[in-house]
Image (cartoon, grey):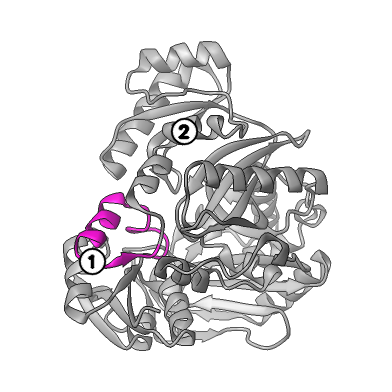
């Protein structure tokens, strides 16, 4: 097994990986920016190396500095977490060049699946249904118009190299098509240095369902069930649950089997997620593949009792999968709430600053809180605004919801604005309780109603 691993990330995911390494008796190296000089992840690691100033592109995205830290500290592998360099094929390739293992798929697979247009083509070869749309990248508006004339409205324009909702625009009428295409293309160029786009028909109403897979170097691929990630705002997930509360057993089986076949088709290795849109008739369509661990991986761990981060490390070291598909048993229901430093009453505006007081719910069976925050710590303005992920598990969905309600009401965060109270109200919303929500429900139904109620109670200034 690896003797030392460098974690090329920060925040709660860096803490999560460090803890997994400690349980495997692996030494850890944290990297940090000057803004994170007092961060928890650098305090928990065996060693810590400053890799640059506060801005991400000068620190957590600085490949040369991170690789130098790995070589100087004798790290044998690098775990990229999610975000930052986790899906950067150049980084994965450079790890190989300096004889450091990249804990994730190889650079070729990252390139293949990171190119959304290419991924669609490969899914077709694997007989996985794809959303009607372009089969090649597009750079000119004339090509967009031609594709829209073929598949019809509404459509979504996406960046080939995209992720995190960047370089993405929904278009509902022809008059706004050109403007939104140019906006998305410009955003993609700025965010990814790539102006290639593709177009898909919007499937509506739809659920956002993703399947967690694990694959080793020897062709063994398994799935760990599905997650429902439909509660999202501006393509950013807010609450996830596993399994989906409304998916039929027949569709669940088919979608998970399709994910496994897709992973086998591309020769995938390590942990990954294949995302689908599921329409009202439970027809499902491939959307994209994430070649990394996901923010919401804890809910899958809760219902399977499988440590995905440890499996990642073992696979990267060259071990066979320690489990088969028959060993995977889904038990109960799990929910994750993302507690962010943001103000829901002001369009979820970021709220960086110092945390003066923090009480994290820590008692009770089936409760987990992933966080890197503590009283006196700071949410910097340079990175993701996540404060904590609160995860609950129950024998039933109702029990998981009840535990989450209790946990969130115990949680206290002072010094910054957060979406904690919004989550408490969300749990009690009828649309959530029924489980019948879609990817549009949060932004089009729940949030407008929530704001209206707040205004009626004079809670909006």
Q: Is residue 71 above or below residue 190?
A: below
Q: Residue 411: x percent and y percent? A: 61, 80
Which residue, given by chain and number where applicable, does mark 2 sit on?
A: 169
Residue lying at 68% horizontally and 60% vertically, measured from the top left: 325
Quadrant location of residue 383? bottom left
Number of numbered discs on residues: 2
Nearer to the camera, 317 or 105 = 317
Crowd tier of the residue under label 2, counting other residues whose Cα lies within 10 Å: few below 14, some 14–19, many 20 or above: many
- Quadrant of the image occupied by residue 74: bottom left
Q: Is residue 82 magenta?
A: yes
In the rendered image, residue 190, in percent from the top left (x then y), is placed at 27, 41
* Residue 461 appears in view: no
Q: Which quadrant, please, contains the N terminus?
A: bottom left
Kindly report the distance in space between the C-alpha atoms of the residues bearing marks 1 and 2: 40 Å
The answer to whether residue 155 is left or right of residue 217 is: right
Mark 1 crowd level (few <14, some 14–19, many ≥20, 10 Å Cα): few
Q: Which residues are magenta?
A: 80-103
Question: Was residue 14 drawn as part of the magenta stretch in this picture?
Answer: no
Q: Nearer the viewer, residue 76 or 42?
A: 76
Q: Which residue is mark 1?
A: 99
Nearer the viewer's eye, disc 1 or disc 2? 1
């Amino acid at each position: 097994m690896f003797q030392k691993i460098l974690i090329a990330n920060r925040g709660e995911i860096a803490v999560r990986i460090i803890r997994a390494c400690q349980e495997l008796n692996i030494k850890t190296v944290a990297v940090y920016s000057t803004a994170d000089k007092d961060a928890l992840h650098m305090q928990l690691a065996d060693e810590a190396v400053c890799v640059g100033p506060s801005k991400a592109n000068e620190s957590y995205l600085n490949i040369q500095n991170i690789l130098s830290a790995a070589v100087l500290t004798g790290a044998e592998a690098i775990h990229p977490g999610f975000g930052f360099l986790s899906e950067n094929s150049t980084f994965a390739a450079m790890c190989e060049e300096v004889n450091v293992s990249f804990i994730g798929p190889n650079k070729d697979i990252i390139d293949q699946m990171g190119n959304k247009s290419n991924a669609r083509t490969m899914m077709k070869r694997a007989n996985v249904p794809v959303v009607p749309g372009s089969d090649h990248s597009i750079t000119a508006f004339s090509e967009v118009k031609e594709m829209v004339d073929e598949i019809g409205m509404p459509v979504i324009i996406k960046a080939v190299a995209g992720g995190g909702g960047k370089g993405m625009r929904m278009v509902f009428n022809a008059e706004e098509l050109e403007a939104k295409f140019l906006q998305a293309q410009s955003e993609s160029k700025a965010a990814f240095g790539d102006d290639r786009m593709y177009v898909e028909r919007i499937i509506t109403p739809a659920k956002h369902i993703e399947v967690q897979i694990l694959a080793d170097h020897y062709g063994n691929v398994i799935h760990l069930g599905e997650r429902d990630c439909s509660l999202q705002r501006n393509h950013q997930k807010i609450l996830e649950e596993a399994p989906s509360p409304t998916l039929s057993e027949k569709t669940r089986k088919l979608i998970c089997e399709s994910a496994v076949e897709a992973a086998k088709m591309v020769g995938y290795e390590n942990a990954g997620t294949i995302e689908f849109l599921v329409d009202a008739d439970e027809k499902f369509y491939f959307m994209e593949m994430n070649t990394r661990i996901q923010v919401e991986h804890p809910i899958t761990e809760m219902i399977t009792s499988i440590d995905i981060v440890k499996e990642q490390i073992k696979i990267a070291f060259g071990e066979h999968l320690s489990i088969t598909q028959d060993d995977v048993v889904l038990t109960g229901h799990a929910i994750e709430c993302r507690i962010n430093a943001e103000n829901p009453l002001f369009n979820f505006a970021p709220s960086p600053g110092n945390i003066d007081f923090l009480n994290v719910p820590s008692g009770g069976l089936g409760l987990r809180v992933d966080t890197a925050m503590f009283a006196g710590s700071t949410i910097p303005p340079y990175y993701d605004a996540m404060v904590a992920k609160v995860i609950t598990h129950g024998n039933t969905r109702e029990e998981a919801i009840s535990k989450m309600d209790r946990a969130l009401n115990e949680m206290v965060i002072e010094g910054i604005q957060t979406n904690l109270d919004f989550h408490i109200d969300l749990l009690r919303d009828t649309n959530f309780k029924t489980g019948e929500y879609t990817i549009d429900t949060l932004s089009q139904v729940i949030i407008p109603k929530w704001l209206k109620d707040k205004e009626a109670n004079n809670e909006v200034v």
